[in-house]
Amino acid sequence: MKKFFAAIIFLTAVAMSSTACAADEPKVLADSAILVEATTGRIIYEKNSDAEREPASMTKMLTCVIALEEANPLAEVTMSRAAVFAEDNTLDWSAGDSVSARDMITAVMLVSENGGAIALAETIAGNVPEFAAMMNDKAKQLGCRHSHFANPNGLPEPGHYSTAADMARIAVYCMKNEVFREIVGTRRTSIHWLRPKEKWAELNNTNELLGKYKGANGIKTGWTRAAGGCLTASAKRGELELIAVIMHSPDHDTRFDDASSMFNYGFERVRMVNGISKARAERTVFIRGGKRATVRAGVTEDLKFPLMAGEDPNLLKVTYDLPKVIDADGGIDAGAVLGEAVLRYDGKPVARVPLVARESVEEGFSFGSLIVRIVAPFLT
């Protein structure tokens, strides 16, 4: 958990009250929707965002980010009979066909290959149930509260459900992976088989916002009769990137209209301001039992924060949840999480960033750490 904790920029984003009136809100026809800022996850707009619904192929976001983390991109992914005969496959597969993991992930994200998602699951976990367990573990780590995944492709199955809010949490995490971001922003590409070598396929992204909506750069469409139209979309203009999730839209086109309306609302009302500065957030922690008496702790990068129209940047303050003294038992590795920098708006916490050790400190003796041991009761 420490590695995961340190790997993400933010841990919590608490939505603050908006000054916009209901009449100004976007007209969204889908049953459930949410709009969040992509760095912090701050909620900009929501409609029934915690309603449990079928996520359809938006499920594949989670499948593919796990594949990117667990599989070598050059690894061979082979289509089993179960994968070949999955419902609604787009590409011309035969049992035994294989492509690289990177190409399979590309096919799954761009043209929503259902069998390809099964092949990834089988390659990584051995079978679909074991991979579904990995999906649920990852979803729990990401803070998903109302989701359960039974398969890697989102085809209807009992016990397979999510919410717009949870899909947004997954999307925020996925878009921090640069390879994932590159894949979902691709409008057209081709993939080439490893076996048989003469086969290849051209892929056209099903996300119709790419190239049509200014700044659109992802992410994943979804559709089944039960789920209706689904879409997780992202768009970036300047420093501001937004993620919109649409669930149970009445038809194919409305989901794109809903997302566009939500993006327009967000880009008109949200601006990014300085939140936590890498240069100003550095702190010193005293060490007991180390070859040094202190270690520097800081954030790995600056954090910008989204403010809505009417909100005052002067009400943003940073506090530090960090012990004054730590023990060097076993040594302290550079990058180890020591605490948190907490961004507050009008006193309320709105974002948390890990404070990590700037350098390694070995366990051992130093005169300075001896002094720390003596005075530690007066420092804590």
Image (spheres, helix red, strand yellow):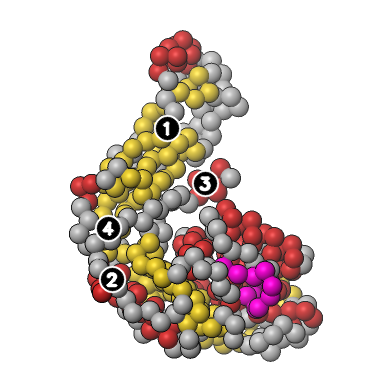
Q: Residue at x 54, y 24 (%)?
A: 328
Residue under label 2, please give it. 22
Residue under label 1, please give it. 322
Quarter holding residue 160 = bottom right
What is the count of numbered marks? Answer: 4
Q: Residue at x 79, y 81 (%)?
A: 81
Q: Which label sits in the foreground, 1 or 2?
A: 2
Q: Give the CA separation, mark 4 to mark 2.
A: 18 Å
Q: Position of residue 80 (x, y in %)?
A: 78, 77
Vertical order, 321 against 104 (above or below):
above
Q: Position of residue 263 (x, y in %)?
A: 33, 74
Mark 4 touching mark 1, by CB under 8 A? no
Q: Which label sits in the foreground, 4 or 2?
A: 2
What's the residue type where badge 2 is placed? Ala
What's the residue type where badge 4 is placed? Leu
Nearer-N-terminus badge (2/3): 3
Q: Specify whether 206 is left or right of 17.
A: right
The region drawn magenta spans 151-162
Nearer-N-terminus badge (3/1): 3
Q: Residues within 10 Å of mark 1 (few under 14, many from 20)?
A: some
Residue under label 3, please give it. 5
Could you tell me which quadrant the C terminus lies in?
Answer: top left
Q: Specify whether 55 is left or right of 156.
A: left
Q: Residues within 10 Å of mark 2 (few under 14, many from 20)?
A: few
Q: Position of residue 343 (x, y in %)?
A: 34, 45
Residue 70 in view of the camera: no
Nearer-N-terminus badge (4/1): 4
Residue under label 4, please give it. 307
